[in-house]
């Protein structure tokens, strides 16, 4: 087995991290299963972490290949403000120029999102008004089961403790069974649960959106 190194994110990792994120965004499968534009999706899913808080991201590397990442945020309120006021305006313009809003699958996705209003305006509002942290993690399919996720999480937890953070959260929908098993194995518990609609292949699918939380402390 090749050695897997866990290290702090560097700016030169940006392209590979964006690619990996989109490769595994749909329950470990490519994001094209439900969203047609990788570049816009990568901006939405990773740009805050790589461009505004890179010190809270860690990556796993094997033989020069980026095989896993964990994006961390140490202040949910700051994240919400940056995304709403800085990222979303430019992202909407970019999406319009690339013709995304003329795609029928995006129309369906937006209709589904409107049905998720409680998740967006109740749960997310409460979450983004806190000053605690959250995370997003991804591991390449051929490197799962090799403790990459666990070691990435340990790196982020150690960093979070140094920043005075006492709690980390992660958002998962309950169809992503593997993610739920992982977080529960690492001491996370479900704190909130909201109904959620996702559009895929011309159909709407019903899920629950789960907020996993873990209290952390120095040992």
Image (cartoon, rainbow, N blue to C red):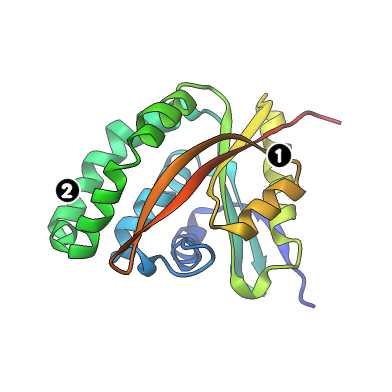
* Residue 167 point in image, percent of width and height: 66, 29
> Where 112 sits versus 37, above or below?
above
Residue at 27% x, 42% y is 114
Residue at 40% x, 65% y is 31
Q: Quadrant of residue 121?
A: top left
Residue at 17% x, 48% y is 93
Q: How many numbered callouts? A: 2
Q: Is residue 190 left or right of residue 218?
A: left
* Residue 88 point in image, percent of width and height: 27, 40
Residue on which disc 2 sits: 93
Position of the N terminus by quadrant: bottom right
Residues at circles 1 and 2 in contact by the CB criterion of under 8 Å: no
* Residue 166 point in image, percent of width and height: 69, 26
Q: Is residue 59 visible?
A: no
* Residue 46 point in image, percent of width and height: 44, 50
Q: CA distance from mark 1 to mark 2?
A: 36 Å
Q: Quadrant of residue 74?
A: top right
Binning the other alpha carbons within 10 Å of mark 1 as few (below 14), some (14 to 19) or many (20 upward) gives: many
Q: Is residue 98 left or right of residue 206?
A: left
Query: Secondary structure under badge 1?
Result: helix
Which of 27 and 98 lies nearest the eye of the viewer?
27
Which of 158 and 131 lies nearest the eye of the viewer?
131
Residue 157 numbered mark, or none:
1
């Amino acid at each position: 087995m090749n050695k897997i190194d866990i290290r702090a994110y560097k700016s030169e990792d940006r392209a590979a991290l964006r690619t990996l994120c989109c490769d595994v965004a749909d329950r470990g499968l490519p994001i094209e299963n439900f969203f047609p534009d990788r570049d816009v999706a990568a901006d939405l899913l990773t740009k805050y972490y790589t461009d505004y808080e890179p010190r809270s991201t860690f990556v796993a590397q094997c033989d020069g290949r980026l095989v896993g990442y964990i994006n961390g945020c140490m202040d949910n309120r700051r994240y919400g403000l940056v995304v709403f006021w800085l990222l979303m305006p430019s992202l909407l313009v970019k999406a319009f120029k690339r013709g995304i809003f003329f795609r029928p699958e995006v129309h369906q996705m937006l209709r589904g999102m409107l049905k998720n209003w409680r998740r967006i305006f109740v749960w997310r509002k409460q979450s983004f008004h806190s000053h605690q942290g959250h995370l997003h993690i991804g591991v390449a399919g051929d490197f799962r089961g090799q403790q990459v996720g666990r070691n990435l999480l340990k790196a982020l937890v150690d960093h979070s403790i140094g920043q005075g953070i006492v709690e980390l959260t992660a958002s998962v929908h309950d169809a992503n069974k593997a993610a739920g098993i992982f977080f529960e194995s690492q001491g996370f518990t479900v704190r909130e649960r909201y109904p959620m609609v996702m559009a895929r292949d011309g159909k709407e699918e019903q899920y629950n959106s789960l907020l996993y939380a873990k209290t952390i402390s120095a040992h």
